[in-house]
Amino acid sequence: MTMTNKNDSLFSRAQKTTPGGVNSPVRAFRSVGGTPRFITRAEGPYFWDAEGQRYIDYIGSWGPAIVGHAHPAVVKAVQEAAARGLSFGAPTEAEILMAEEICRLVPSIEQVRLVSSGTEATMSALRLARGATKRDKIIKFEGCYHGHADSLLVKAGSGLLTFGNPTSAGVPEDFTKHTLVLDYNDPQQLEDAFKAYGTEIACVIVEPVAGNMNLIKATPEFLQTMRRLCTDYGSVLIFDEVMCGFRVGLGGAQALYGIQADITALGKVIGGGLPVAAFGGRADLMQHMAPLGGVYQAGTLSGNPVAVAAGLSTLKLVQEPGFYQHLSAQTTKLVEGLSAAAKAANISFCADSQGGMFGLYFAQEIPGSYASVMASDKEKFNRFFHLMLDAGVYLAPSAFEAGFVSAQHDDAVIAATIEAAKQAFAQLH
C-alpha cells in the first residue's frame, strides 16, 4: 500500500482554497520544482515539516529569526503581551519604546511611523517623498524588490533612461510611467539620469545590501554617488532596509557604509517574526505625515502590542555584547566551508556574506548586478537545493534569494550543513 506524504496531501488541499496553494509565491517551490514543506514547529536553527522531518533552516522566516526560532525571551514577551490583550486601536507605551529604540539605533531616523509590513513601509516612504518634494518621478534598480506596491512592480524599459514597464498583471502602465529603472552598482547611469531628470526626481529607493536577487552588496561608490546626487538635486534618498536592517549589523547597512539615508524602511528583524515594519527619517520630512501634514497613511493594526513586544525583545537580544561578531563569524564559516567543498568537487560555485545574510551562486565570480545574477546556473542550483533538502538542509527555494543565519547556528550545525553540501556537490557532475 502506498503511503501518502503529508506535505503532498496538504499542498493538494491548499490549492483548492488558496491560489497556488500558498500565501506568498516563493513558498510554492515553482522555481525549484517539487512539493513545498508544510512547517509544524520551529526551535533554534531548526524547523520540522508535517512528516516530522527536521531541517536546518536557512531562511529564518526570510530574515526575522535572527536570534533563532522560538527564543524563550521572545516567546515570554509575546505571551505576556497577549495576556494583556491582542489589539486596542489606541496608542500604547510599547509603541513609544519601539520608536525610541529605532531612533537611537539608526541615527538617520529622527522620527518613525510603525506599520505592519515591508510593502506598507516602502509604499508609504515613496508617498512621503513625493508629497514632501512635490515631484512624481522615482528611481529604483533592476533586481531590487521593495514590496508589491504598484509603482515598484517595474522592470527596466527598453533602453537607458526609458521609464519602466509593469512586471505584474493588474498594474496600469500609468502607475509606472514615472519609475525609472537603472542597473544596480552603476554610478554613471545615476549621473546620467539626474542630468536628464534631476529636478523632477522625488526619490531614489535602493536596497543597500540587496537580498531579493540573491545577496548583492552595493559598492561604496554607487551609494556615495546616490547620496551626493540626491543632496544636490533636492531628492529624497530612501534606503530599503526591510531585509538588511539589523541583519547585517546593529545600525543596518547605512552604518556599515557610513551613509545616512533621508528615509529608511525597516521590517523583519524589528518584528522578531511577527508583522511589524516601519519607515522613518528626518523630522522635517516626517512632519509631512498625517495628522500633521498632507501625506496620508493609516493602519488598524499598526504598532500591534503583541508584535511590538516580539520586536522589542529581539532588538534587546541583538544588542548583547558580541552578538553581531558571532553571527558574522558563523555566516563566514558557512560560506567559506561551502566554497571549499565546491572547489574540492570542481564545481563552478562561489558564496558571499554580510552579517547574518549570505548568497550562493553557481557562477565563476560573485555577481554585482541583476544581469550577472541571472547568468548563474539556475538548473544546477535547483538540483543542489533538492539534494540539500533531502539531506535535511532547507535553503531558499530560489536561485535568486539570499539566505539567513541565526545566532543559534552553532559550529555543529554549520559543520553538518557543509558535510551535506560535500555530498551534494559530489552528485552534481
Image (tube, rainbow, N blue to C red):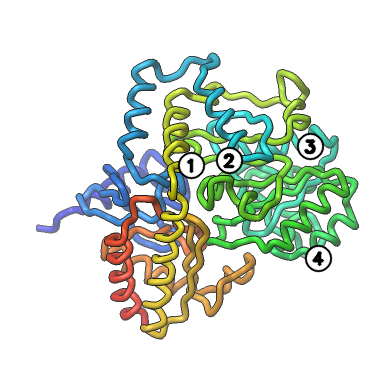
Q: CA distance from mark 4 to mark 1?
A: 33 Å
* Quadrant location, the N terminus: bottom left
Is residue 311 visible in the rendered image? The answer is: yes
Assign a secondary structure to mark 3: helix
| Of the two numbered discs 3 and 2 in the rendering, the one whose residue sits closer to the viewer | 2
Q: Regarding mark 1 in the picture, which secondary structure is present there?
A: helix
For the residues bearing labels 2 and 4, Cβ distance under 8 angstroms? no
Could you tell me which secondary element the residue under label 2 belongs to? strand
Q: Amino acid at mark 1?
A: Val
Element assignment for label 4: helix
Residue highlighted by disc 1:
269
Which sits earlier in the primary sequence, circle 2 or circle 4? 4
Where is residue 280? Give x, y as percent.
66, 34
Q: Which residue is mark 2?
A: 266
Question: Is label 3 in contact with label 2 (beta carbons under 8 Å)?
Answer: no
Residue 30 in the image, given as x and y percentages of width and height = 43, 58
Specify the amino acid type for callout 2: Leu
Badge count:
4
- Whether 229 is drawn above or below 221: the answer is above
Q: Is residue 28 at least partly visible in the picture?
A: no
Q: Residues within 10 Å of mark 4 (few under 14, many from 20)?
A: few
Quarter of the view holding residue 333: bottom left
The CA span between labels 4 and 3 is 24 Å
In the rendering, which numbered label is found on residue 130?
A: 3
Residue assigned mark 4? 188
Q: Residue at x 33, y 32 (%)?
A: 75
3 or 1: mark nearer the eye: 1
From the viewer's perspective, is the residue at label 4 or at label 3 nearer? 4
Is 137 positioned to the left or the right of 111 in the image?
right
State how far apart marks 2 and 4 are (Cα): 28 Å
